[in-house]
Image (cartoon, rainbow, N blue to C red):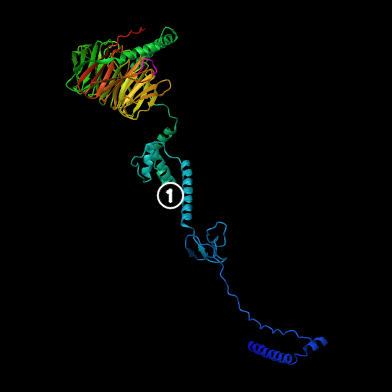
Amino acid sequence: MGVDEDVLHLTKLAESSSDIMDTEAVDAVAGEGSVQATITAAPTLVPPPVVPPLAPVALVPPVSVPRPLAPLPFGAHVIRPPPKIGEAGSVDTDSDGDETGGRGAAPGSTVEYEISEESRQVRERQEKARQELLLKRRAVALAVPTNDDAVRARLRRLGEPMTLFGEREMERRDRLRMIMVRLEAEGQSDKLLKAHEDESPSARAEEEEEDAPQYPFFTEGSKALLAARNDIAKFSLVKAALRLQRAKRRRDDPDEDLDAEINWALKQAEHLTLHCSEIGDDRPLSGCSFSNDGQLLATCAMSGVAKLWSMPRVGKVSALKGHTERATDVTFSPVQNIIASASADRTAKLWSTDGTVLQTFEGHLDRVARIAFHPSGKYLGTTSFDKTWRLWDIESGEELLLQEGHSRSVYGIAFHQDGSLVASSGLDALIRVWDLRTGRSILALEGHVKPVLGISFSPNGYHLASGGEDNTCRIWDLRKKRSLYIIPAHSNLVSQVKFEPQEGYFLATSSYDMTAKVWSARDFKPVKTLSGHEAKITSMDIVGDGSSIVTVSHDRKIKIWNSDYKGEKMDED
């Protein structure tokens, strides 16, 4: 049945239904009066209303609603060609677990999404780190020459620069190792084999020697040096035994009052006053030294002339002329009245008090900085800007020892009171303590941040004082092998430090700030400041009993500082 026929049929049914309803309404109006009777007499059956059938609804296919797509990654999607037949594996996806296609793509679809830029960079970094790790593991297993000459030669054979600017030996060796690993990874093993075959047998022999156990390097000394070491050992053993015996007696004797002795020495230092000032030379003064008995004073100047002065009036005794360059230091022998002077002409000279040259010590390759006598008076130590210090025999003038050990110029030198040790300081800010009996460096004291110019051993045997361009004075404990105290001594570099030579109860320092200062050796507190020079002070010295201090300066003046303390003097051993 067609749709039009169904609509016509429904229309006819609706019209017939309306006619029937109109006829029933007329009959009801006409017989209104007899309705009650009729109802009471017999009930009338009312037919149920007729419900017209609904027309069939045509089936219309539903409109398909698109499902929401999976969230897109940061990058835009790209259409990649399907994999070729026979290729192993499937198309790369963003997820490790998805083996059928890209995330959000239907099975069989060729549409995929590339990974984000951040993820790609992370993966590249991880892959690069993995490759570097593998290369390093391979590099460790490679045999690389240890001789620097062999490393350079192999680099040249491989067509690489022999050295780079600022490159050290170990860095050059590591560079060769990485180059060899890279060539091997790139499949250029034949190049490596050729470079290895080109090496001469002598180079391989040198490499084998390098791999052999290394023994300490030393230079065989002369018989004179051996005799000097034996003599120094005998001298130092006696001196050390006497020093220890005296220290034990002072400790165990109830009548000994160490604090009282220190207080007396510090009181004497507190009363130091300027006693005399004298013009020492036409040029700035550079060094000074008291004789062992305190009756003579030696000074030197940039004019190259050393002079002797009588004490305490500071009268000129003689002039020591012989150096061709400026004199840098002067010192008296501890056992006799002979003088040693150092100069920028690379020599040191030994003088008598009448101005006669006794010995000339030649051998340094640069100017001599400081000199010092061994406590036995038989040997002389000199330091130089050639990065060495040397030991000389006074009688023969022979060079007994040439000692290296500093990376820069050596400046200060001091002998231990026992004679067993010598300390050297340099412009490398390092202090080395050497054992003269064996020739070994037994201590390397690091702490100064600038060149160390002055050093001095304390008579107690275990303290060492040093001063330098960092404006500080450091006290080192040789027993603990470390810095015990740091004194912020001056506002300019410290040019010289000296312990009081008898007991070491106080310490004196001089500086380019035109002052000299006295410090207590008990707590290293300041005791006295000696002011009066008009230019930087280059050197100073203390007389044997500690009652006088001499300072020399670039103002060409010699100043003598005496103590007028009248307190009761302690008994001396």
Residue 306 visible, this orientation: yes
Judge from the rendering whether residue 242 lies leftward or rightward of residue 531; answer left or right.
Answer: right
Residue 363 visible, this orientation: no
- According to the picture, the residue beneath numbered tag 1 turns out to be 188
- Number of marks present in the image shown: 1
Is the residue marked by circle 1 packed among few (<14), some (14-19), or many (20+) residues within 10 Å?
A: few
> Foreground: 497 or 103?
497
Judge from the rendering whether residue 20 lies leftward or rightward of residue 362; answer left or right.
Answer: right
The quarter holding residue 230 reads top left
Judge from the rendering whether residue 218 lies leftward or rightward of residue 399; answer left or right.
Answer: right
Residue 328 colored in magenta in the image: no
> Foreground: 129 or 160?
129
Which quadrant of the figure contains the C terminus?
top left
Which quadrant of the figure contains the N terminus?
bottom right
Q: Farthest residue in the right direction?
A: 41
Q: Is residue 52 above or below residue 220?
A: below
- Residue 466 coordinates in the image, percent (x, y): 34, 23
Question: What is the three-letter code of the residue carrying label 1?
Answer: Gln
The quarter holding residue 545 reads top left
Q: Which residues are magenta?
A: 457-462
The quarter holding residue 254 reads top left
> Foreground: 313 or 426?
313
For mark 1, give the secondary structure: loop
Q: Main secondary structure of the magenta part?
A: loop
- Residue 155 coordinates in the image, percent (x, y): 37, 43
Q: Is residue 240 above or below residue 84?
A: above
Q: Farthest residue in the front direction?
A: 33
